Structures are given as structure tokens and as C-alpha cells.
């Protein structure tokens, strides 16, 4: 399973990193984000790209688990 | 508020409030202008001595404190920083030089268009071109690297400074400069301007309203969320300007604007390009500053110093047009942004790898 860590990255890099990973067309992917804005942006992008996702809170960060 | 309705509503409120602020005394088409207002504050604090643009604009303090309170309430306040601070500072200066060439930040650009100032169309074309340049670098892996969690006090410092600025405005000690004529003299009453800022700051924090983000996300991800805010501001400010009889269409004799198309264009190319590399427009930087993002605080400080540089060295345009010094500065800034973009993207690392290979070979 692919996993990317976007913590600490400023807008729009979390989405760009997700986009880059998605371009390889993975079945599933985990994305770590550390703020609400990035969580919402990445989630919206995943939805538009046809992935379903689930957000888990991991301490102060969020783990977005997406799959086709 | 993360809905399309939310961002359209926010845009509507910003557009209407901007027009009302003009009604209450702000300069025409300048209900809000982050670049102009930071420039006025720099003048009010004596960082530059351009007598017509000195005032401690409470809209700015309102924006910051509104966003700060909202971020605290929604538990989105996070002290962080350390993502290339000095480059961000430099880009802050550059964005200000571009904005003061055009005479307005991206928000005022939209408000100018809504007031019938057609020079803003040239500005928007330049702004979009600058965003395109920025996206080119983003696609080449441009990054200012990650930020880190910091102590709470680090993030609180900037909102607290804004409380001090408000205190200085209200107490008006002799060492604060207040314009006696020109745009700096024109301002809405303090309480009205402050409340306007608080409302817009709170809404912008919830919706992430960003002028540069609108066009950027549309091109980069085909995402229309932020551009809806941009369009909504325009539409509602336009309606407001019609309703109050402020709409005056044309290129010539527009308020606090000049009609030099080339330099209006180039100023906004620079502003858009720099803003994309920073990750948000000047207004967004203020909102992020209020959320504890000290990288954005550094950027705002860059804009503050940039405003002083612009007026101390005669770089800022006036209604008479751009200055030769300003033109040289804008060109120099293009070179600097290009270098910043190149050396912080994967282009430079590929280059050095190739060079390394040659050496080995």
C-alpha cells in the first residue's frame, strides 16, 4: 500500500503530492495530513478522482485512507 | 462552511462590506486592499514618510483578530513555522512591489473591476499569467520545505501585536503618523472598519477564501471551490457599486489607479507568481498568520518591509503612473523569483545530478 506524508507542507502541496501518487493509479493509498484545510482539500481531490476514503485522527494529525 | 454555498456567501459578504466601507469613508474601490492597508500601517508607524498613505487601518487588525478568534474556537489554531522563512520574507517584499506597481492586492484588483476600472482586466490577465508561471514551478517540484510545530506563544505573538496596533490607533500618540490628505486621510470610522475586518476575517478563516488559490486550483486540479469566492466578491461588489452609484466604467481617471497597461500587467504577473510560490494571496497570508502559521507572519512582515521599501525608494506607482525605479525593481524581482523558483524545485537537483554524473564519467 502506498503511503505519503504531507505533514508540515503548505498549500497546495498536500494535494499536489496526492495527485502525483494517484497518477500511478494505486488501488489504495494512505495520506498523512496535519491540518483541517489539507484534510478537506485532499479529501475533495480524492472524491473528484473517484476514490472513496475514510479519515482517522491519529494524535494531532489525520490519516486519510483512500481506495478505489 | 466547507461547501460551495459557504464560499459564495463569504464572497458576497466581502463584496458588500467592501462597497459599504467606501460609503463610510474608505478611498474608492478600496473597501479592502491588503497591500494598500499594510502599506498605510507601515506609513502610520513611520517606516516610510509618504504623507498621503499613513494610517493604522483597523480592517487589518480586524481580519487578523477575527480569524484568530475563529481558529481558536474551532481548534484550528496551530503554532508552526520554519518553512524557508527568509525566502518567504523575500517573496513577501516582492509580492508587495508587484502589488504597488499595479496599486492593489488581488482582492482590490477584483474590487477595482467591480467599480468599472477596466485597468483591472489587464491586472487579472497578468495575475493569471503569474499564477501560470507559479504552477509551472509547482509542477517542477517547487517546495519551500516543511514547517514544524512550535510553542503556542510563538503563534500568539502576531495576534497580540495586532491588539497593540489597535491600542495605538485608538490612543493616537504623537509618534504615530496619520495622513492629513490623500487616500490615508480617507477612512471609515474605527469601529465600523474593525467590525468589517472581524467579520471578513472570521469568514475567510472558515472558508479559506484566497484570490490566488481560486485560479491556481482551477488550472491545477480543475477544482472550482475557491474561484467561486473570487467570482462572488466581484458580482456582489458590482451590485453594490451599481446600487450606490459608484460604478464608473473606463480606463482613465479611475480612483487610486493608473492606466499604464504594460506595468499594470507586469505588476500583477509578479504578484501572482510570488503568491503561488507562497501558497496564498496577501489576504490568505494574514488569515494564516492569525492561525499560528509563523511562516505567514514572516511573509506579512516581508510585505510590511516591502511597502516601506516601495515608498522610501520611489518604487510605488501613483495615479500619474509607474516610476522608473519601480520598473527596474519589478524587472529585478522577476529575476529573483525565477532564481527562487529554480533553486527550490527539482530542476536544480536534476541539474546538479547531471553535473555530478559528468564529473564521475
Image (cartoon, grey):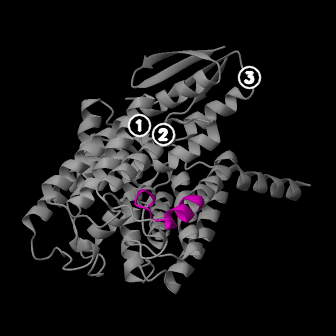
Residue at the location (43% across, 69% down)? B103
Find the magenta span and give its range. Answer: B113-125
Q: Does residue B122 belong to the magenta stretch?
A: yes
Looking at the image, residue B137 sits to the left or right of residue B192; the answer is: right
Residue B299: quadrant of the picture: bottom left
Task: Please report, as a chain letter, where disc 2 is located.
Answer: B
Q: Which mark is residue B243?
A: none
Is residue A68 among the parts visible in the rendering? yes
The residue positioned 34% from the left and 56% from the top of the image is B241
Label 3 or label 2, whichever lies nearer to me, is 2
Q: Is residue B79 visible?
A: no
* As drawn, A65 above or below B71: above
| Subunit under mark 3 | A
Q: Looking at the picture, do discs 3 and 2 lie on one chain? A: no
- The mark found on residue A25 in the picture is 3
Where is residue B215? Give x, y as percent: 56, 47
Circles 3, 2 touching at the beta carbon (< 8 Å): no
Q: Is residue B250 left or right of residue A24?
A: left
Q: In x, y percent, where is residue B22?
A: 26, 60
Q: Is residue B351 left or right of residue B8?
A: right
Pointer 2 residue: B228
Helix, strand or loop at label 1? It is helix
Q: CA distance from mark 3 to mark 2?
A: 29 Å
Q: Which mark is residue B8?
A: 1
Q: Residue at x 23, y 59 (%)?
A: B23
Q: Secondary structure under badge 2? A: helix
Residue A1: image x %, image y %?
Answer: 67, 16
Task: Specify few, some or many for label 3: CA neighbours under 10 Å numbering under 14, 14-19, or 20 or more.
Answer: few
Amino acid at each position: 500500500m502506498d503511503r505519503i506524508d504531507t505533514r508540515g507542507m503548505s498549500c497546495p502541496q498536500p494535494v499536489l503530492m496526492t495527485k502525483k501518487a494517484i497518477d500511478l493509479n494505486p488501488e489504495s493509498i494512505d495520506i498523512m495530513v496535519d491540518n483541517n484545510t489539507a484534510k478537506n482539500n485532499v479529501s475533495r481531490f480524492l472524491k473528484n478522482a473517484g476514490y472513496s476514503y475514510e479519515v482517522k485522527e491519529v494524535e494531532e494529525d489525520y490519516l486519510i485512507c483512500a481506495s478505489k | 462552511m466547507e461547501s460551495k454555498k459557504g464560499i459564495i456567501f463569504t464572497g458576497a459578504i466581502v463584496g458588500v462590506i467592501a462597497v459599504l466601507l467606501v460609503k463610510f469613508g474608505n478611498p474608492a474601490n478600496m473597501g479592502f486592499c491588503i497591500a494598500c492597508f499594510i502599506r498605510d500601517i507601515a506609513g502610520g508607524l513611520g517606516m516610510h514618510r509618504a504623507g498621503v498613505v499613513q494610517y493604522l487601518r483597523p480592517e487589518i487588525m480586524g481580519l487578523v483578530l477575527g480569524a484568530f478568534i475563529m481558529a481558536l474556537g474551532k481548534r484550528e489554531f496551530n503554532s508552526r513555522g520554519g518553512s524557508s522563512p527568509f525566502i518567504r520574507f523575500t517573496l513577501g517584499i516582492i509580492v508587495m512591489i508587484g502589488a504597488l506597481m499595479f496599486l492593489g492586492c488581488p482582492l482590490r484588483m477584483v474590487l477595482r473591476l467591480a467599480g468599472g476600472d477596466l485597468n483591472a482586466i489587464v491586472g487579472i490577465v497578468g495575475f493569471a499569467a503569474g499564477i501560470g508561471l507559479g504552477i509551472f514551478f509547482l509542477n517542477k517540484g517547487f517546495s519551500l520545505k516543511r514547517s514544524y510545530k512550535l510553542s503556542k506563544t510563538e503563534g500568539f505573538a502576531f495576534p497580540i501585536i495586532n491588539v497593540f496596533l489597535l491600542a495605538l490607533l485608538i490612543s493616537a500618540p504623537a509618534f504615530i503618523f496619520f495622513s492629513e490628505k490623500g487616500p490615508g486621510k480617507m477612512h471609515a470610522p474605527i469601529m465600523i472598519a474593525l467590525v468589517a475586518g472581524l467579520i471578513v476575517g472570521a469568514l475567510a478563516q472558515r472558508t479559506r477564501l484566497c484570490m490566488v488559490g481560486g485560479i491556481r486550483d482551477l488550472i491545477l486540479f480543475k477544482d472550482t471551490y475557491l474561484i467561486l469566492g473570487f467570482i462572488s466578491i466581484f458580482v456582489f461588489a458590482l451590485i453594490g457599486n451599481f446600487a450606490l452609484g459608484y460604478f464608473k466604467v473606463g480606463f482613465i481617471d479611475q480612483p487610486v489607479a493608473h492606466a499604464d497597461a504594460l506595468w499594470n500587467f507586469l505588476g500583477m504577473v509578479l504578484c501572482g507568481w510570488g503568491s503561488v510560490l507562497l501558497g496564498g494571496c496577501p489576504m490568505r497570508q494574514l488569515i494564516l498568520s492569525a492561525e499560528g502559521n509563523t511562516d505567514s507572519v514572516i511573509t506579512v512582515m516581508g510585505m510590511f518591509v516591502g511597502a516601506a521599501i516601495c515608498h522610501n525608494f520611489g518604487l510605488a506607482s501613483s495615479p500619474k503612473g509607474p516610476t522608473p525605479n519601480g520598473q527596474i525593481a519589478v524587472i529585478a524581482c522577476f529575476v529573483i523569483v525565477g532564481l527562487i523558483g529554480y533553486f527550490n524545485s527539482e530542476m536544480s537537483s536534476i541539474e546538479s545530478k547531471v553535473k555530478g554524473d559528468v564529473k564521475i564519467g
